[in-house]
Image: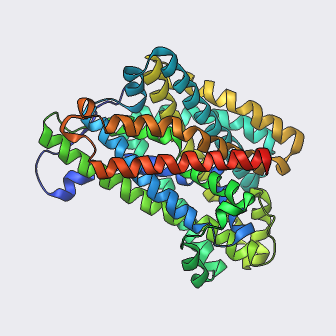
Amino acid sequence: MDVFRTVPVLRSGSIFKRALAFVGPGFLVSVGYMDPGNWATAIAGGAQFGYALLFVALLSNIMAIILQSLCARLAIASGRDLAQACRDAFPKPVAFMLWIFAEIAIIATDVAEVVGTAIGLNLLFGIPLEIGVIITALDVFIILLLQRLGFRWVEAFVIALLAVIFACFMFQIALADPDWGGVLRGFAPTTDVLHNKNMLYLALGIIGATVMPHNLYLHSGIVQTRDFGESLAEKKSALRFATFDSTFALCFALLVNASILILAAATFHKSGNTTVAEIGDAHKMLAPLVGSLLAPKLFAIALLCCGLNSTVTATLAGQIVMEGFLNIRLPAWMRRLITRGVAIVPAAAVTIIYGTSGTGFLLIFSQVILAFQLPFAVVPLVMFTANRAKMGDLVSPLWLTAISWLVAIVVIGLNVKLLWDLAFG
């Protein structure tokens, strides 16, 4: 990437100032918690099952923290992002297939962004969905402007929108007045998800919406925007700060991620509207259920901010994936238009044929596709970070490698279980 080692890092001084230089990449990664696809799965999950799927949100958050720490470790220890590491390690046919899977994941993410942003424009300004889908192609100019100003401006833009999203949801939750006892019980583990196909489908969608494949490529690339030095001591210090950045950002994002589900449970599930899955329907029903006309406005503002944020991260991930796997460098605007163009086709088709009734299904289905792509990014990541020849003294300790393999097994197991249920259930 053009921004490689462009953000200066203090070599001495207070820990706070040194850590502050690493704040940013984690928040770009945390956008995966709040993209429009996540809204659809969380709304459907909260409406159907109340607070029960909060445990899945918590589990996916823990999985994300572990995997993103591996991404930072890989980048800092080897100087390679995940895509580059795959190109180095695997035969060309294998690397090519992994690139295809990564591109499918980015397109699935883009579909969610297209639909979500179009819905946000429709709810706030009354722009028809079909027109909104086309307008989303213009967001490439936002990315170009931010990248010209510098990578810190990209991070500041994302963090500012995250703050708006957080404020909107905190206010809506206060209006909804959820059952806090039920919320706490919802974070407790349950085996119901393994016996209920609909619950499993939504649980897998939540995991796919949170632990997103493109985020693994993204994080391993943007961590290297920091000019942290080459000595072992400097790399160890950078790893500590980068891990703290991603862990803090993902814990903060869990509040928003869980808030979407809590809001749906406290309003729709509580009132018996258990079939709500469409974002547009949720927007319409909020005002009478919480007794405030402000709630749906905040809902729409947060949705639009989510769409814009996801645009930034998907663009960067697309650059990292293409440059890393194929060693081909394309201008940011061209790369963005290619992926957005591919995503617009299914999004436009669904909105034109089915209108708002089909967007909820498309959003949830896109997140399930992401979950199916996860193993093809997670397995190489765990393999590389456990390889001393590649990682040197920063190789993952045995306990971290064991936990990481457990995460990979859980993701793959959930995918197999869902496939079996869909085929034979």
Instruction: Identify the residue at horizontal 51%, vertical 54% (top origin).
Output: 161
Q: As displayed, is residue 276 above or below residue 233? A: below
Instruction: Identify the residue at horizontal 37%, vertical 26% (top origin).
Output: 2
**Residue 12: percent from the left, percent from the top?**
10, 49
Q: Specify whether residue 225 is in view.
A: no
**Residue 43: percent from the left, percent from the top?**
69, 62
- Between 337 and 321, the one lying in front of the other is 321
Instruction: Identify the residue at horizontal 11%, vertical 53% (top origin).
Output: 13
- Between 155 and 100, the one lying in front of the other is 100
418 relative to 385 in the view: left or right: right
Corner quadrant of residue 261? bottom right
- Between 20 and 86, the one lying in front of the other is 86
Q: As displayed, is residue 253 above or below residue 138? A: below
257 relative to 225 in the view: left or right: right
**Residue 417: percent from the left, percent from the top?**
66, 50
**Which residue occupies the extreme left position in the image?**
12
Q: Specify whether residue 85 is in view.
A: yes
Instruction: Identify the residue at horizontal 72%, vertical 55% (top origin).
Output: 124
**Residue 220: percent from the left, percent from the top?**
38, 37
**Which residue occupies the extreme right position in the image?**
353
Corner quadrant of residue 192? bottom right
Q: Quadrant of the N terminus?
A: top left
Coloration of the structure image:
rainbow
Q: As displayed, is residue 108 above or below residue 210? A: above
Q: As displayed, is residue 217 above or below residue 329? A: below
Picture mark count: 0
